[in-house]
Image (cartoon, helix red, strand yellow):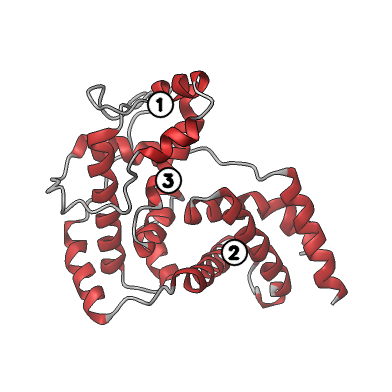
Amino acid sequence: MNFDNVFENYSKYIYNYALKLSCNPSVAEDIAQETLIKVWENISQLKDDNAITKWITVICLNTFRMRMRKEKGVRELSYEEINELERDGTFFTSNDPLPEDYVIVDESIKELQNGCFLAMVRRLTLNQRMAFSLVDMFGLKVDEAAEILEISKSATKGLLYRARMNLDSFFGDHCNLLSIDNPCSCSAWIEFSKKRSDLQKEVRKIKLVNYLDYKEKEYGYDEEVRKKVKYLYENMPDRKPSDEWYKSVITAFNKTNEN
């Protein structure tokens, strides 16, 4: 397998996974580029071409982890934290898939909605975000995610339970897509942005949520909210990185070959 094949077949996959991990397009481009270079540099280690997708996913996740460790001093989960997660994992429940018309999202608001949903995933703890991105956003099974994260299946379920409860508690009270009685509407934001040139200044005045903690809100599990949030995250469309990113990857690859 040569670089052209890897680049053509997996660059978009890598970028979209990096985006769901980082929830930041510019960071995702950096992680995806670094991942592609690492994939090519280590391609000889791949013994089974059928396992390339999982292999690439692990490299991308570890690249993201390394970046987060440098930026935020991320530490590994302690023994006590793992035990606590495994206890929370007993509350984890799987959800049946929804019919396609269960949550109807207007095409005109999808871009804003997806940006909002990515922003709220960034409010999860890093470990919750990684588990949630693998299972609820990228569609892996819990046992597959546990293997990639190198923690027990029960602990992975615990991370997913906390991530889901945190996101459900926020969107259940705020998002108009979940309930028409909620105050925040994508359409209203779009209209506001059309009328106001200083949208960013106004947004800065709004107190953003620093992190999500469903326990502070005394949130209880709501099956209908869970199904809607799960559906919306599962159906976030893939994005295509910028043309400049493709050019930067080729440049980086050529420099690597020169060295």
**In the structure shown, which secondary structural element does the residue marked by tag 2 occupy?**
helix
The amino acid at mark 2 is Ile
Residue 10 in view:
yes
Residue pointed to by mark 1: 186
* Percent x, y of residue 134: 43, 56
Disc 1 crowd rating (10 Å Cα; few below 14, some 14-19, many 20+) is some
The amino acid at mark 3 is Ala
The disc, 3 or 1, on the residue closer to the chain's N-terminal end is: 3
Image height of 206 relative to 135, above or below? above
Q: CA distance from mark 2 to mark 1?
A: 35 Å
Q: In the figure, residue 249 lies in which quadrant?
A: bottom right
Indicate left or right for 173 with 30 as reference.
left
Residue pointed to by mark 3: 119
Residue 2 in view:
no
**In the structure shown, which secondary structural element does the residue marked by tag 3 occupy?**
helix
Residue pointed to by mark 2: 56
Screen quadrant of the C terminus = bottom right
